[in-house]
Amino acid sequence: MNQLIKSEQRYLTNTVTPDLMRRFVGFIDARPKTIETYTRALKQFVRFLAENDIETPKREDIINYREQLKATGHKPGTVSLYIISVRQFFKWTGSEGIYPDVGINIKGSKIDKTHKKDPLTSNQIKSVLQGIDRETLRGARDYAILATMTTGGLRDIEISRAAVDDMRALGDSTVLYIQGKGHDERSDYVKIPEPTEKAIRRYLMIRGPVDGTAPLFESLSHNNQGQHMTTRSISRIVKDRFIAAGLNSDRLTAHSLRHTAATLNLLNGGTLDETQQLLRHTNINTTLIYSHHLDRLKNQSESRIATAIF
C-alpha cells in the first residue's frame, strides 16, 4: 500500500488522501487478494478524480466514473468490482464521519448470468486426454490434472492447493479433500473415480517418493520446481492441451472443465441436487443455469417447424 501511495501521489485528491487510503485498507477484514483488488480499484478511481479535477466527489461523479469504465472497454464484472470498491470506501468514510456516503445504492454493471466459457463435449474431452503422452512425467501429471478437474468439477485454485495426503479413503471410496474457493480449510471433498485415481497414482509412481505434505501436482518449472503449481500455470497447461487437440477458442479455458463436469453429469442422469453437490454451489440458482441450457437444447421446436414446412 505504501508503494502505491508513493507512486500515485500525483493522483490523490483532497478527499482520497494517503492517510484515508491507508486507514481504509487497514479497516478491511478480507483476504490479501481482496485487499489487493480494492487497492487497485481505488487507484483507478483517484486517477479519474485527478484527470477530471474533482476535489469533492459527488454521487454523479461515481456514476460518470462507472460509465467511463464501460466506455473504455472494461468487462461488466470488472466495472461492478470497481464500483463495489468505491462504494465500500465511501460507506466507510460515511460511517466514520469523515466524508458523506456518496456511493450509496449506485449499481455496477449488469452482468450476464449465462456462462462466459463453453463446456467440452464428451468426444472433445476424450480427444484432449487421448492426445497426452502419459509416458513422460509432464504428460502423466497433465493427464491426471485434466482428469481430476473434469470428473470432480474442480477449479484451478483447488488443484493448486491440493497435497498428496489430501487424497485418502472414505468409506469404500477414494476422495480428494479440497480447500474450496473462499474457504480457509479443506472442508469439502470430491470422490475420485477409478480411472482418475489410476491416473493420479501412475503420475505419483513416475514422480517417485514424496512427503505427504508435498503438492499433489508439483511444478516442473525451473523457478518453482517441486512446489505447488500456480493457477496461472494450471490454466496454461489446460489451454495448451486444448490447442494440441485442435480446440482453440477464447471460450475454452480451464474453467471449461468445470462446465464440462456439470453438463456431462446432467446429460448422463445426474440430478440438479447431485450436480449442486458436485460443484459445491451454495445457491442452487447457480446450478440451474446448466439445467436451463440443457432444457433449451432438448427443445425440438425448430425441427418440428422445419418438418412442417420442408
Image (tube, helix red, strand yellow):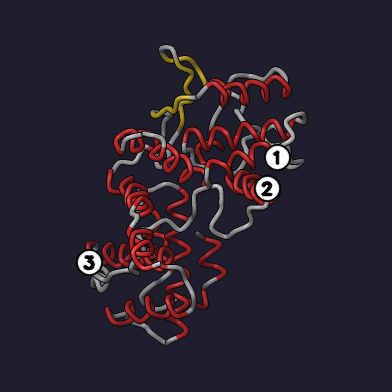
Query: Which residue: 50% across, 17% down?
Result: 168
Work out how far the residue at label 2 is from the one at label 1, CA to CA, in angstroms.
7 Å
Q: Secondary structure at mark 1?
A: loop
Q: Which residue is mark 1?
A: 131
How many C-alpha atoms fall within 10 Å of the one at disc 1: few (<14), some, or many (≥20)? Answer: some
Q: Earlier in the sequence, mark 2 or mark 1?
A: 1
* Residue 273 position in % (x across, y down): 29, 35
Q: Can you say whether 33 is above or below 8 in the image? A: above
Q: Determine whether 102 is above or below 29 in the image.
A: below
Q: Which residue is mark 3?
A: 97
Name the residue tied to disc 2. 245
Chain-order first, disc 3 or disc 2: 3
* Residue 73: % across, % down: 49, 75
- Label tally: 3
Closer to the camera in the image, 210 or 52: 210
Question: At which x and y percent is residue 194?
Answer: 54, 21
User: Which residue: 42% across, 27% down?
Assistant: 189
Residue 173: percent from left, percent from top: 45, 16
Q: Residue 112 or 4: which is nearer the viewer?
A: 112
Mark 3 surroundings: few (<14), some (14-19) or many (≥20) residues within 10 A? few
- Gap between marks 1 and 3, in whole Å? 62 Å
Marks 1 and 2: in contact by CB < 8 Å? Answer: yes
Task: Using residue 61 as the reference point, say whether residue 155 is left or right of it.
Answer: right
Instruction: Inspect the image, locate mark 2, and give the three-letter code of the amino acid beneath it.
Output: Ala
Element under disc 3: loop
